[in-house]
Every structure is written in structure tokens, then in C-alpha cells.
Amino acid sequence: MSLAFLPSPSRGVVHLGPFPLRAYALCIILGVVVAVVMGNRRFVARGGQPGVVADVATIAVPFGLVGARIYHVVTSPAAYLEDPVRALFIWQGGIGIPGGIAGGVLAGWVVCRRRGIAPGAFADAIAPGVAVAQAVGRFGNWFNQELFGRPSTLPWALQIDPAHRQEGYESFATFHPTFLYEALWDVGVALVVLWVDRRYRLGHGRAFVLYLGLYAVGRLWIEALRIDDAARLFGLRLNDYVMAAVLLASVTWLARTRGRGREDADAVQRPVPSTV
């Protein structure tokens, strides 16, 4: 064990009478709130109406959580083969951010189109907030003592209780805190997107694509540290292929749309004709 290390919370659930209060769920909820608040300010600054981000989030977030859970189960099936019903127990941890982004983007795109909102402008507005939300949500993994990296004796190594250690790593006590690495990376991604967006006035989804590309870069090196069970192909985790594809697509999209400015304020949100 390293002489200095980061401790893990002794428990991730506090009971208020008969009601369990789960830190994992609170981290996700707090992240959503942060994303909505940041996204609302940026969307209004672009010419949108206040409250629209929260309205879209009420639909996009549930779809994102479903997509995140499906992605996690598909890429880490070993934990659910013997008891498939456990796949429904999302409060025990286990969501895949790539699936969450896909589910949320699909639902958000449909809602935006129906409400006369430019999807690209909306995505650009929420991009930094989504990155910060992911950073906050990662602390749920800390409370659950999950998704940590290889054994480590660095001063910031994370202590993991014996009951939560991966098979084959029972003799090790401290590991790379990949939850913290990703949280810090996500905050950095948000700051870079904010700076680039302000300097170059990104529009038409370019800020969101920049966020995707930067996130993929970080996730690739973090995946190389993780030791949790995951589906593999030719020795690499499935997440590696997904992130590589996201990075390639992001770079291609940014290169092909180079020079495109930001949408005019009156094009961000158009009135939808009444059907009544």
C-alpha cells in the first residue's frame, strides 16, 4: 500500500427512515442540474428562450439513462449472464457514457425538430455543461468503489475495500482513481470548449462535436488503465473502438465544416405553427 492514498467512502447509501438515499443517483442528478443551468444560460445568449433546455432535458435525460444502461450491459455482459434481472438495477452502478450520449442526442434531436429549435445551436449551447455533468457523475463511481484502474502506489492512488476489488487483484489495496482522472479531464474539456467557442464563435453543432472529440481522446487513455470486466475484441476493450470512431468522426466533421460561423439569433428557435 502507498504511504499516502485517497480513501474510498465506506458506504454509498444513507437511509432516511425507510428511504435509501444513494450517492450514485445524487451525483447523476446534480450533474443534470449543472448541465441544465449552464446550457440554459448559453442557449439564451444564442437567441433561444429561457426554460427550453430544462424542457428538452426532461425527455432527453431519461432516454440518455436508458441508452447508458444498455451500453454498459452490452459492453460488460459477464456481470449479468447468471442473473439478467440485475441489468435493471441501475442504482447499483454501471452506466456507459457513450450510450448515454447517443440516447440523449437522439431524443434531444427529435424534440428540437418538433419545437422549431436548431439542433446544432442547442447542442453547442449544452456541450460544456454536459462535460461538467459527466465530471460530477463520475464521483458516483467513487462512492460505489467501481471502475478503478490498475494497482498503483502513487500518492493519489485510491484505496479499495477488499469486497470491491476485481478478481485477481485481491492482494492489492490501492489503484489508479480513474474516476478522478476522467472527472478532471471532463472539466478540462468544458473549459477548452468554452474558450474555443468564445474565440471562434462556433455554430451548427461544432462546439458539441469538439466536446465529443476531446472526450474521446481522454477516454482512450483512461480505458488503458481500467481493469473492470468489459467486452473485448482482438485484445482491446470495445470502448476503445467506439472512442476511436468518435474521435475520427469528430475530426472529420470539424475539418469539413471549417469556416462555418454561428447561427443568427433568429434562426436558433423558430415559432412552431399551432395545430389547434
Image: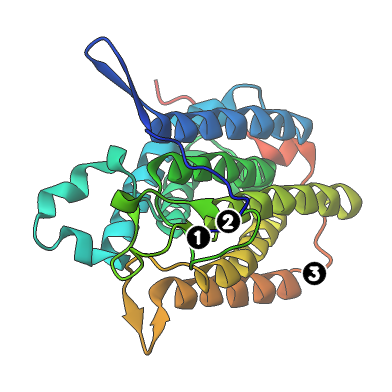
Q: Which residue corresponds to the image point at 61% horizontal and 77% vertical from the top-left?
A: 248
Residue located beneath label 2 in the image: 157
Displayed quadrant of residue 269? top right
Q: Residues within 10 Å of mark 1 (few under 14, many from 20)?
A: many
| Amino acid type, mark 1 | Phe
Task: Indicate the quadrant where residue 251 lies.
Answer: bottom right
First of labels 3, 1 by sequence position: 1
Q: Is residue 195 left or right of residue 16?
A: right
> In the rendered structure, are the residues bearing label 3 and label 1 in contact, judged by CB atoms less than 8 Å apart?
no
Please state if 161 lies on the left or on the right of 29 as rendered: left
Residue placed furthest toward the left: 82
Instruction: Provide the residue designation for mark 3.
Output: 258
Q: Is tag 2's residue or tag 1's residue first in the polypeptide sequence?
A: 2
Q: Residue furthest bottom?
A: 234
Report the residue at 61% width, 49% height from top.
Answer: 183
Residue 161 drawn at (x, y percent) = 37, 48
Q: Going 54% across and 34% down the picture, which residue do you hit? A: 31
The image's mark for residue 175 is: 1
Foreground residue among 275 and 48: 48
Element assignment for label 1: strand
In the rendered image, is residue 30 in sight?
A: yes
Q: Amino acid at mark 3?
A: Arg
- Residue 74: horizontal and vertical position, in percent? 27, 64
The kind of secondary structure element at disc 2 is: loop
Q: Quadrant location of the C terminus? A: top left
Residue 227 place in picture, x, y as percent:
41, 68
